[in-house]
Image (cartoon, rainbow, N blue to C red):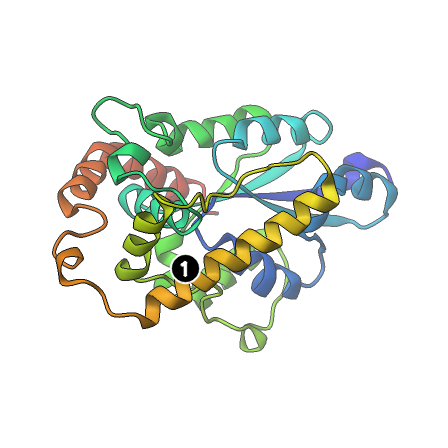
Amino acid sequence: MNEKQKEIFFHVGTGKTGTTYLQYRVFPKFKNIYYIQRTRYKKSKEIIRNTNYDRYLLSREFDQQMEREVKWFAADFTDTTAIIVFRRHDSYIASQYRRFVKNGFTGKFTDFFDLENDNGYFKQKDLDYFSQIQLLEQSFAKKPIVLFYEDMRQNPETFIENLANRLKVSVDIKSLNLNRKHSSYSEKQLKGMIRLGKRINLQKRRITQNGFLHFLWKLYMGAVRYTVLFLLRILPENSQHKEKPLISPEELEKVKQFYTPDWEKCREYANSNAD
């Protein structure tokens, strides 16, 4: 089959927007489309070239590496429809911070995202959603499908049905597991991880170029982190650590207000391109 006849949909994440949930509980259930699972993403171009399906859906979770990966795929498959899910900025960056703390990050929220001076691990541009829409428009010939995490959480059935209609696929909603795939960790656990992480390096990192040894190291560190998280869940919390929240509500409100124009532009774009 000529590659130009193949219809391709590319879900580009991003992180903490229900990506893993979609990848493992929703996309595999879509009918009339060939789904390329996230673990096969690096071979996606080869798969599309060497198979003869009419329609393809691939998915990969991106954050700061989105531009690089989008351009990599678009170099060979420009006639692609991208799918992106956004989460309100304050909720998104708070969830990202909690994820990083769970994985060994020991800094404060303002070390992770510094709205005032832009010196954090995540930069202001990383939360500029409309620029991500523009990237997708510039990289691919077709307008992207823009969806929202809050809609998924509020009414997953309607969200999935809408997405299925946009992709022109069928899905049996009753067969889906609509429960959340990942559970959240408590403030007590995450604050405990920060305190322990300042004494022991629990961060995800590469200590060897040997692939097999790196795999073993990842298993070992993962086991250590999850054991620590379990122990922190069952151990009582010191009263002096209860008072101060992990993330200041005032900081999150600043993030929300700062990005409100961007959020409204994305909502307007999604509504204008919903058909």
Q: Quadrant of residue 90?
A: top left
Q: Residue at x 44, y 48 (%)?
A: 103
SS of the residue under disc 1: helix
Kindly give the residue lying farthest to the front in the view shown.
Answer: 199
The quarter of the picture where the N terminus appears is top right
The percent position of residue 226, horizontal first and vertical second, equals: 47, 61
User: Quick one: 15 or 204, which is closer to the camera?
Assistant: 204
Asked if residue 90 lies left or right of residue 165, the reply is: left
Asked if residue 53 lies left or right of residue 167, the reply is: right
User: Quick one: 262 or 17, which is closer to the camera?
Assistant: 17
Asked if residue 247 lies left or right of residue 113, the reply is: left
Q: How many numbered circles does the render carry?
A: 1
Q: Residue at x 47, y 46 (%)?
A: 15
Q: In the image, is residue 158 above or below residue 8?
A: below
The percent position of residue 67, horizontal first and vertical second, equals: 54, 27
- Residue 114 visible in the displayed image: yes
- Residue 140 visible in the displayed image: no
Q: Quadrant of residue 28?
A: bottom right
The percent position of residue 132, horizontal first and vertical second, equals: 45, 31
The percent position of residue 236, horizontal first and vertical second, equals: 24, 70
Q: Residue at x 24, y 29 (%)?
A: 115
What residue is pinned by disc 1? 152
Name the kind of residue labelled 1 in the image.
Met
User: Quick one: 108 or 4, which is closer to the camera?
Assistant: 108
Neighbor class of circle 1 (other Cα within 10 Å; few <14, some 14-19, many 20+) is some
